[in-house]
Structure formats: structure tokens, C-alpha cells
Amino acid sequence: MLLDFSNKVYALAPLAGWTDLPFRQTVKKFGADLTVSEMISSNALVYNARRTKKMIEKSPLEIPYSVQLAGAKPEIIRQAVEILNDEEGIDIIDLNAGCPAPKIVGHGSGSSLLKDLVLLGQMIETIKSTSNKSLTSVKIRLGFDQKIGPEIAKVVEASGADFLVVHGRTKTGAYKAPVDYDQIAEVKAAVSIPVLANGDIDSFDKAHSVMDYTKTDGVMIGRGAMGNPWIFKQLREGKANLSREEKYDVILEHYENMVSFHGEYGAVLFRKHLHNYSKGYEGASLFRDTINRIEDVNEARDLIKEFFR
Ligand SMILES: Cc1cc2nc3c(=O)[nH]c(=O)nc-3n(C[C@H](O)[C@H](O)[C@H](O)COP(=O)(O)O)c2cc1C
């Protein structure tokens, strides 16, 4: 079984600008069961396939691997899925039905789909009937501005999705409103496909209390993994933290993978990760100021080695 829902599933959330191949590979080494690409615009895939395909490359460690599509039109999403059908190594196609960013919502994609459940159903049916991958999934919020999570979940299930992820906020709730774990539990109870809970889960204790409370089949973790890829080891083994030396090795390897994947610009793209990795270290604020001004790959590596050793 590609994703074994008879055990709790621990998934890394898609995070645009963050969950590129090097980060997913880092997280995978700590035992994440599922990794998902950054959101891929179906338009971009259809009209600019070459550039967009770089974003869907995966590490060989990523089994199963999910590619998340955003879109607003069944015909375009069908063409995007056909392009993915020719790509090896993708196991799941996930539909983004939760992104609240104005640019995405303005195009009728992401959480906009929660305003038109007929269209949402058509999008899912189109993916399911076109895809040659093993599974189809959908990542939803509880609604656009009203909480209608169970109703949305039933449409997702009836349209043929194999599992769903629910972020326990509405679009209007953005990233700060309290996560409604009661309604996540209602979503789980409303359908018979597996459900993963998402939203503000950032520790062993929180993950286990959410799973106990909502009866969901696992959790998906986003911001809790930023600067903290070892959280997936902790989810299985308890709270044990990595030693400073172990973290040093992880951070340095992540950096080297960034540079091999993105080229020299990888050093600049890695800054945001360093901002998170350096939290709690003495001298972190001076380190962040300094690294923000470095573009050279070797200079950045030297500073990383000096700071995290
Ligand atoms: C920087 C950032 C980028 C995100 N990009 C995506 C995305 O591409 N696709 C998606 O479905 N959700 C995206 N999300 C939402 C997360 O996957 C997740 O649902 C949300 O952050 C709540 O989970 P958390 O509290 O564990 O972070 C993004 C969130 C953040 C903060």
C-alpha cells in the first residue's frame, strides 16, 4: 500500500517557496510518510511546461510523492494532468482547494473553489478520470467565509478523491484564526475516505492530542517543520531533540542540496531557512543580518559552518 492509513500518516504540507526538492528531501530523512510539491499552477504547467517541470522534480527518497495542482477550469486541469501522466515517479495528484492568496483566489483557484462545490466536484472528477497515478487527493479549508467543512468533504468523497486533508480554518481565517478541531472531527465523521488534520500542529503532544480528539488518520505539518525538519522523527519517537552536532550536519547537507539543485542562487534562497534554523542560537540576529548580505556560495558556507558548529 502506497500510503498505509492503518497507521497514522505524518505528512509534510505543501508550502510555496519552501517545500522545494532540497527541503522535502531533508524532511523525508526524518521519516515523513508523504511529501507534496509546492503548489503548481495548472496554467503554468500547460503554457510553460519546461520551467514549471523543474518545480515537480523529486528526490528518489520521496515515495510516495504528491504533486499539488491549482486551477479553476476543468479543461486546463485535464491538460495539466495529461502532462503529469508522462512524468515518472509521481504517485498522487492533489488539488489545492484552500489557498487564500489574493492572486490565486482572484483567478478562481485555491479556496475560491469552496464557493462553488459543483465546480469543485468537476475538478476532482476530471483529475480522477484523467490521471494515471495511484491516488487523487484534495486539500481543503473549512469553507470560504462560512464553515461548511462536512458538506465540502462529502463532495470531495463523492467526486472520487481517495483521501483529503483539511486545514481547520476558513479562507477568511487566513493563517491566524483559531483552528477549529471540532469541525475537523465533523469532517472526519462525515466521510469514509481517510482524512488528515492540518493547522497549527507543531509538536508530538499537539499531533497526538489532535489525532485523539478528531479521530483523523494522521496529520499534515507546515510551519511546524520550518527550521525544524526533525519534527517528523519526534512525532514517532517523542520529544527527544537532536544534538547541536546532529543539527549542524542536517543544516549543512540541506545547504549543499540547495546549491546543487538551484545553482549559486541556492545560497540566497537558503537565507529563509537559516533564519528559522538559527532561532534559539546565541547571536542569531547578527548572524541573520550578515547572511542576508552574502551571495557567494563559499562565503555563505563558511559562515554557516562557523555559526552552527
Ligand atoms: C508560506 C506558506 C506557503 C504555503 N503554500 C501552500 C501551497 O502551496 N499549497 C497549499 O495547499 N497550502 C499552502 N500553504 C498552507 C499550508 O500547507 C498549511 O495548510 C497551513 O500553513 C496550515 O498548517 P500549519 O499550521 O501546519 O502551517 C502555505 C502556507 C504557508 C505559511
Image (tube, rainbow, N blue to C red):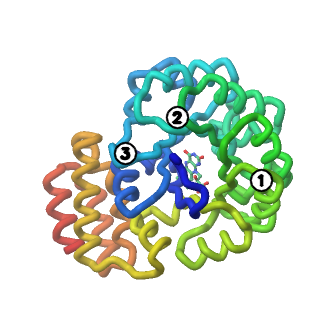
> Disc 1 marks which residue?
142
Q: Amino acid at mark 1?
A: Leu
Category of crowding for the residue at label 3, using alpha-carbon neighbours closer than 10 angstroms: few (below 14), some (14–19), many (at least 20):
many
Splitting the image into 4 quarters, where does residue 210 fall? Answer: bottom right
- Does dot 1 land on a helix, a strand or a loop? strand
Rendered-image quadrant of the C terminus: bottom left
> Disc 3 marks which residue?
21
Splitting the image into 4 quarters, where does residue 205 fall? Answer: bottom right
Q: Position of residue 53 (x, y in %)?
A: 41, 28
Labels 2 and 1: the sequence-earlier one: 2
Q: CA distance from mark 2 to mark 1?
A: 22 Å
Determine if the C-beta at disc 1 is less than 8 A from ligand 1.
no
Let me know if residue 105 appears in the view.
yes
Q: Amino acid at mark 3?
A: Leu
Q: Amino acid at mark 2?
A: Ile
- Residue 265 or 235: which is nearer the viewer? 235
Q: CA distance from mark 2 to mark 3?
A: 14 Å
> Disc 2 marks which residue?
40
Q: Position of residue 31 (x, y in %)?
A: 41, 61
- Residue 288 or 153: which is nearer the viewer? 153
Q: Position of residue 83 (x, y in %)?
A: 50, 21
